[in-house]
Image (cartoon, grey):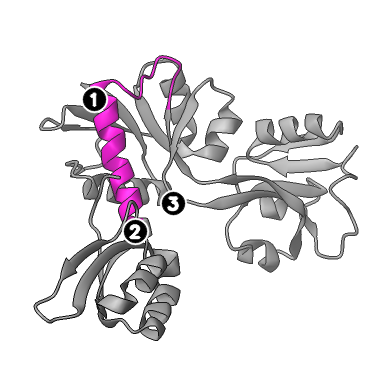
Amino acid sequence: MLKIALPNKGSLSEDSLKLLREAGYKLRRDNRELSVIDADNHIDFLFLRPRDIAVYVADGVLDLGITGRDLLLDSTAPAQELMALGFGGSRFCYAAPAASQLSSQEFAGLRIATSYPNIVIADQLQRNCQAEIIKLDGAVEISIELGVADLIADVVDSGATLKQMGLKIIGEPILFSEAILIGNHRTDPESPAIHRFMRRIEGIIVARSYVIVEYDVKDQLLAHCCQITPGIEAPTVSPLNKAGWCAVKAMVRRSELNTVIDQLEEAGANGIIVSDIRTCRI
């Protein structure tokens, strides 16, 4: 039976549960249990602190885990990223008071408050810079106002919290983070149980990124429309019960959908219909 760690709280937890339920796993959790067994799929899901998941997976106590890329790197545990999951996206950035003239090359001797000391230490070594790292468990934005630090390094989503605290981002992000599936040095992605799990998850991720576009088009316009909707391998083309017309079906990236519809309409396609995909394998 596979043992897979999931975050026990926060947005990573909610989105992980949604992803796995869409992939067909039974994850009804009552009374905040630490473990839920999906007997049909032979998986034991364990709910752990997101910061601890990389450690358990790296030690081989668990087979797989879902955590943030930032948490994996900060743990320094020898776990490996197997798959990006497409949610929980954020940037890890330095920030200082809005009036500051600091650049990202001028941190030597300054105090940097962060909940991710190992990420910052690694970045400072790469910059050949010696700053003082102040480790805090959370709410690092207030540390500058309280005189604990000169600048901070933290996960940034929209940046609204920084702005409210009178701070601004300095330099480029240290890293871009998102939810990831991790394993350890013994993890074999081709073993039947792990391969099946990863393919199910991949099917949901792809389905979230694509839609099915269907439309009718005259035969003489077909080649041009197929250039607009090439699909994954090729579009599906079927003759209509109307001379000189055919029906076309193709997968289209969700992010390009409206542009594609505009182009199809301009090219002469009719009856354009868009459908969501629940899951797929490509």
Q: Find residue 218 and report its image quarter.
A: bottom left
Q: Given contact means CB atoms under 8 Å apart, are the residues at marks 1 and 3 in contact?
A: no
Q: Find residue 148 and report its image quarter.
A: top right
Q: Earlier in the sequence, mark 2 or mark 1?
A: 1
* The magenta stretch spans residue 203: yes
SS class of the residue under badge 2?
Answer: loop
> Along the line of sight, which residue is nearer the eye, 23 or 207?
207
Q: CA distance from mark 1 to mark 3?
A: 24 Å
> Along the line of sight, which residue is nearer the eye, 146 or 101?
101
Please state which of the two labelled residues, at mark 2 or mark 1, is closer to the viewer.
2
Q: Earlier in the sequence, mark 1 or mark 3?
A: 3
Q: Amino acid at mark 3?
A: Phe
Q: Which residue matches tag 1?
A: 193
SS class of the residue under badge 3?
Answer: loop
Please state which of the two labelled residues, at mark 1 or mark 3, is closer to the viewer.
1
Which quarter of the image is occupied by the N terminus?
top left
Q: Which residue matches tag 3?
A: 87
Residue at horizontal 36 percent and vertical 19 percent from the top: 188
Which quarter of the image is occupied by the C terminus?
top left
Q: Which residue matches tag 2?
A: 231
Q: Position of residue 175 (x, y in %)?
A: 64, 44
* The magenta stretch spans residue 241: no
Q: Which residues are the magenta region?
A: 183-208
> In this orientation, does residue 197 appear?
yes
Q: CA distance from mark 2 to mark 3?
A: 24 Å
What secondary structure prevails in the magenta region? helix
Callout 2 crowding tier (Cα within 10 Å): few <14, some 14–19, many ≥20: some
Residue at horizontal 13 percent and vertical 75 percent from the top: 240
Rendered position, 230 above or below 219: above
> Along the line of sight, which residue is nearer the eye, 92 or 268?
268
